[in-house]
Image: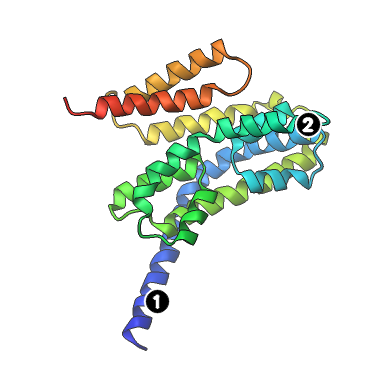
Amino acid sequence: MSELDVQSDVVADMRRHQVWHGLRDAWPVMLGFVPFALVLGAQAVQKGFAVIEVPMMTGLNFGGGSEFAAVELWTSPPHVLLIVAITFLVNSRHLLMGAALAPLMRNLSRRQAFAVLFLMCDESWAMGLADARRSGSGLRLGYFFGVALGLYGCWIAFTTIGALVGPVLGDVTRFGFDMAFPAVFLVMLAGMWRGPAAARPWLVSLVVAGATHLLLPDGAWYVPAGAFSGVVAAYAWARPA
């Protein structure tokens, strides 16, 4: 066996280890996905979606917030332009998330980078970014795909199950499943906590998003408003005195 073959085997073994490591770390988040995936699937069929259309939506979009918004706005016939606009607004945070990952993906091919961005959601982004900072070697593809593919498969599977069992269970929010969504984000924030000073942009983002939601209750303008204000605050506090 040549030295090149040995190196390839070592890299493959390392990638497999990273995938399993990522999948293991993603298990708690995957469990948190289950309740609100069931809620989304059940609400979608109640709005007139066919069961097969639910995994098509969740697999092609893979953004829970925008999917809940789209289902909430769904009518027959649907207001396509309104739904597209709201989906763009809710998912606009991905522009900032992708920008944060860009410096860590310089060694990736274009195909690898596109795969990372397609599978990127709030949770895989946060976990991949935290792992890259711990390792100090950029985004580790094996770890990221272990996290992202686990979350992706879980989301599609349980939104589909929600669509299948929704008509039987009725309004699943009465079981408190909808509380899983904020609970997952609170866990993510706890894992990213670096002290009160570093969290000041979070507070700015929260206040601006809340005020925007109160002043502009129709639509999802609070999402880009909160994201943009948080970035501006982070930049302002990061500037040297």
Residue 156 percent location from the top left of the image? 66, 47
- SS at mark 2 in the image: loop
Q: In the rendered structure, find residue 19 and report the number of the disc placed on it.
A: none
What residue would you read off at disc 2?
A: 78
What residue would you read off at disc 1?
A: 9
Q: Residue furthest bottom?
A: 1
Q: Residue at x 71, y 24 (%)?
A: 174
The 10 Å Cα crowd at callout 2, few under 14, some 14 to 19, many 20 or more, is: few
Q: Nearer the viewer, residue 41 or 60?
A: 60
Q: Earlier in the sequence, mark 2 or mark 1?
A: 1
In the depicted structure, whether residue 78 falls above or below residue 161: above
Q: Amino acid at mark 2?
A: Pro
Q: Amino acid at mark 1?
A: Asp
Residue 31 percent location from the top left of the image? 57, 42
Q: Nearer the viewer, mark 2 or mark 1?
A: 2
Q: Residue at x 63, y 31 (%)?
A: 85
- SS at mark 1 in the image: helix
Please indicate, yes or no, whether residue 199 appears anywhere in the rendered image. no
Q: Residue at x 41, y 32 (%)?
A: 189
Please indicate, yes or no, whether residue 158 appears anywhere in the rendered image. yes
Contact (Cβ within 8 Å) of mark 2 with mark 1: no
Q: Image check: 38 left or right of 75?
A: left
Image quarter hosting the N terminus: bottom left
Query: For residue 54, which quarter of the picture?
Result: top right
Q: Residue at x 52, y 26 (%)?
A: 223
Q: Residue furthest left?
A: 241
Residue 100 percent location from the top left of the image? 38, 42
